[in-house]
Image (tube, rainbow, N blue to C red):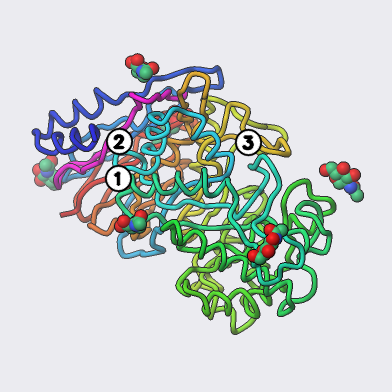
Amino acid sequence: KMALLSATLLALVPFTVVVTLSTGSNKCVPRNFGHGSVVCECNSTYCDSVGSVTLPPLGQFSSYLSNKAGSRLEESQGQVHVNSTGAGLRLTIVPYQKYQRIRGFGGAMTDAAAINILSLSPGTQDQLLRQYFSTEGIGYSVVRIPMASCDFSTRLYTYAETPEDYNLDNFTLAPEDTKMKIPLLQRAQALSPRPLSLLASAWSAPAWLKTNGALIGKGSLKGQPGGKEHKTWAQYYIRFLEEYAKHNLSFWAFTTGNEPTAGRMTNYSFQALGFTPAEQRDWVIMDLGPALQASSYPDTHILILDDNRLLLPYWAKVVFSDVHASKYIHGVAVHWYLDSFVPAELSLGTTHHLYPEYYLFGTEACAGWSPVDRGVKLGSWERAEQYAHDIIEDLNHYVEGWTDWNLALDQTGGPNWVKNFVDSPIIVNADRDVFYKQPTFYSMAHFSKFLWEGSRRVGVSASQETALEVSAFIRPDGSVVLIILNRSSSVIQFEVWDPAVGYISTTAAARSLLTLAWNTH
Ligand SMILES: *[C@@H]1O[C@H](CO)[C@@H](O)[C@H](O)[C@H]1NC(C)=O
Ligand SMILES: *[C@@H]1O[C@H](CO)[C@@H](O)[C@H](O)[C@H]1NC(C)=O
Ligand SMILES: *[C@@H]1O[C@H](CO)[C@@H](O)[C@H](O)[C@H]1NC(C)=O
Ligand SMILES: *[C@@H]1O[C@H](CO)[C@@H](O)[C@H](O)[C@H]1NC(C)=O
Ligand SMILES: *[C@@H]1O[C@H](CO)[C@@H](O)[C@H](O)[C@H]1NC(C)=O
Ligand SMILES: *[C@@H]1O[C@H](CO)[C@@H](O)[C@H](O)[C@H]1NC(C)=O
């Protein structure tokens, strides 16, 4: 209520005062844990925020800067010039080169995320949810929800534990859903100015439907696509949609299952369900697609793969080789692990050019997963750069949005029942009833807060070779957003030229992420 009131007041006071108030009263409370940069500490009564962003009138631009030195979405404004400043490097916006439209950005409401959020006092819980979902937050619109347990759970369970229950008469949501995830999702939805795009992914089918009789390890569905196990597994998805609908939560999409290649490895250590691309294709065409179309939710999108993008274009070629695939499938979901092994143009670019009718969407990413760089690192700027680098690369290769993994973790990077601890943009410290916004939180913000749904990626050309990584967009209201990552050590001044408005003279500070935005009318 307080926040709404002050937002309304801010809208009424003169422009220069707005800037002073919104930056002065909402600065980051920095804490340095010795990992290169700072985190911003938040509690029930205080959290840094840039508020709800309004761009200055035509002829001026806004700039938001985060960097290793400790700036966090630091706002400033400047004049757009009529003439070039003669800087060596010029980035030119090319509005007639039009690419994909943005769907959204977000994170996952895992059991672990819910446990961590609920470990805080109610006031601090609200503060945390506002950071992601409210107008003064960073504009998350996508939430991925595991269907039953995954590694970020404290126990192994599915929604259909009665053996041979092929009609799913005993299908029932878990306490993790009804007592934790669903109430939090409802609160997130209430804070959000727009309907959230919910996305569901299952990790494992019930053990009695699987070849190995267990949720973990190497195993797939018994029988063949079209058989009773495959039909029941399709119906499980429909029952899930029905149960969540009873709580007023409807889904934009679900995937065909998390990381199908995991369940094909020897003795995989946590919940998995193996599919070959051919089996996934036939299951969708014979079972899942028809079940969804016959259900009350025929408009829910089906996304295939939900696994590392280096499996492309191979996986897409196998699935889309069947002429019936397009009747049921809308897109291809990718994870970011192992991205550095295959160029984005080869995996994402080729897939888009072969199958432009299917969209690409990022469904999972996190820092701290690699054995050589494990777990939580409070204040790591390298990890912020990893995020921004990957998001820019994905966006520049037709991906329509990017979903982070756990919305919140504890200081060890869990809970996780197999101790597969990783990092998160928000780390909670329940003992002190505070949470830390990591540099990766701001990486997400530089995109999620500015790239509204429907924003269109456009061309941007550089006048000379540059180490800057950039991506440009035109939003539905005609304003332009340019995101610039500087991981380099080369010193160069540069300017931005938008033929529609003029020249912007600026610098990308050392080790920084910069979002520039301006009106065009
Ligand atoms: C919350 O943080 C602010 C800023 O650091 C501080 O002034 C305030 O006392 C804290 N409130 C609580 C309840 O700890
Ligand atoms: C822009 O350049 C033109 C031609 O060089 C010059 O005549 C004009 O005065 C310049 N305008 C501004 C605002 O500097
Ligand atoms: C499954 O459902 C049936 C019918 O509703 C009920 O009689 C039975 O007790 C349930 N079994 C389990 C294990 O929950
Ligand atoms: C369900 O959600 C819609 C939109 O999010 C909202 O308008 C409505 O009040 C909700 N209904 C219930 C029963 O919560
Ligand atoms: C599989 O892994 C589990 C521990 O994750 C271990 O107890 C078991 O012996 C392993 N089985 C095989 C066949 O390697
Ligand atoms: C990028 O950062 C480096 C230091 O890491 C700095 O020297 C350079 O000036 C920056 N680049 C631009 C274009 O401002």
Q: Which residue is mark 1?
A: 496
Left or right: 346 as drawn, with respect to 469: right
Task: State which quadrant residue 505 falls in.
Answer: top left
Between residues 136 and 353, which one lies in front from this camera angle? 136
> Residue, x 44% and y 50% (percent of image)?
105
What is the x, y in percent for residue 221? Answer: 76, 67
- Could you tell me the amino acid type at mark 3? Val
Left or right: 47 as drawn, with respect to 200: left
Front disc: 3 or 1? 3
Q: Main secondary structure of the magenta part?
A: loop
> Residue, x 45% and y 38% (percent of image)?
443
Disc 2 residue: CB within 8 Å of ligand 6: no
Q: Badges 1 and 2: C-beta atoms under 8 Å apart?
A: yes
Count neighbours of disc 1 (C-alpha within 10 A) and say few if under 14, some if 14 to 19, many if 20 or more.
many
**How far, Cα to Cα, is label 3 from label 1?**
38 Å
Disc 3 residue: CB within 8 Å of ligand 5: no
- First reached walking from the N terminus: tag 1 or tag 2: 1
Residue 458 showing in the rendered view = no
Left or right: 156 as drawn, with respect to 125: right
Residue 162 showing in the rendered view = yes
What is the x, y in percent for residue 253? Answer: 50, 63
Count neighbours of disc 3 (C-alpha within 10 A) and say few if under 14, some if 14 to 19, many if 20 or more.
many
Magenta residues (range): 39-63
Count neighbours of disc 2 (C-alpha within 10 A) and say few if under 14, some if 14 to 19, many if 20 or more.
some
Considering every residue shown, the one lying at the far bottom of the view is: 323
Q: In the rendered view of the protein, which quadrant contains the C terminus?
A: bottom left
Q: Which residue is mark 2?
A: 506
Q: Which residue is mark 3?
A: 422
**How far, Cα to Cα, is label 3 from label 2?**
36 Å
